[in-house]
Image (tube, rainbow, N blue to C red):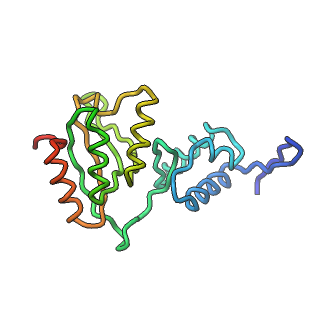
Amino acid sequence: MNRKTIRGKGRDQQKLDGTERRKKILEILNQEKGPVSGTELAKRVGVSRQVVVQDVALMRAEQEEILSTNKGYILRRETSKEGADCVRVFCANHTTEDTLSELQTIVDYGGRLLDVFIEHEVYGQIHVDLIINNRLDAEEFMEALKHSGDQPLKILTNGCHYHTVAADSLKHLDRIELELKKKGYLADS
């Protein structure tokens, strides 16, 4: 094993080589139930946050399914009892003021919002993992967006955006679609 000893704050710390460090990052993400920030991962493996970002990029290139959310990194996992979720993509178009209601509608009817993406005329598809599983996740996402001063991705496409939603059954997805239509949040097909 390639390790370097780093001296500091009264104790020796073993610094992992790249392969061992990436393995340790995967172990941490596997053990945690929720997202882990890049800063927290960096602290746990003894490197800078930028090194963690680079490690995650390398692991993704090696087909590791690591999602990057506004709360941190998380491994994509099968979550339904049967082993695979039903998934549907919804094309939405609504005001920014309706975003929280849209997110809450999805989770209230049994959905888990996996991502948001847009089809940009110049850049092509721009995709962001969200992982919103409940009302609290939705509220925290909206608070983070509000405090960042940034605009939602849909601003680039005059409100048109897509969500990948997972649920335990097609019945749940049908109900989500019905409720989103009732509220006028889906784009006209």
Measured as percent of width and height from the top left, residue 74 is found at 50, 53
- Residue 120 x %, y %: 27, 32
Residue 27 or residue 177, whichever sits in front: 177
Q: Furthest residue to the top?
A: 149
- Seen at 37% across and 68% down, the residue is 80
Image coordinates of residue 102 in percent, x first then y, are: 26, 44
Image-based side of 163 in relation to 38, left or right: left
Q: Is the C terminus in the top left, top right, bottom left or bottom right quadrant? A: top left
Indicate whether 21 appears above or below 171: above
Residue at x 44% of width, y 42% of height: 140
Q: The N terminus is located in which quarter?
A: bottom right
Return the residue nearer the eye: 91 or 148: 148
Image check: 179 left or right of 122? Answer: left
Using the rendered view, name the quadrant where residue 81 is placed. bottom left
> Is residue 72 left or right of 81 when viewed as pictured?
right
Quadrant position of residue 123: top left
As drawn, the residue found furthest toward the right would be 10
Residue sitting at x 28%, y 46%: 163
Query: Residue lying furthest bottom in this view?
Result: 82
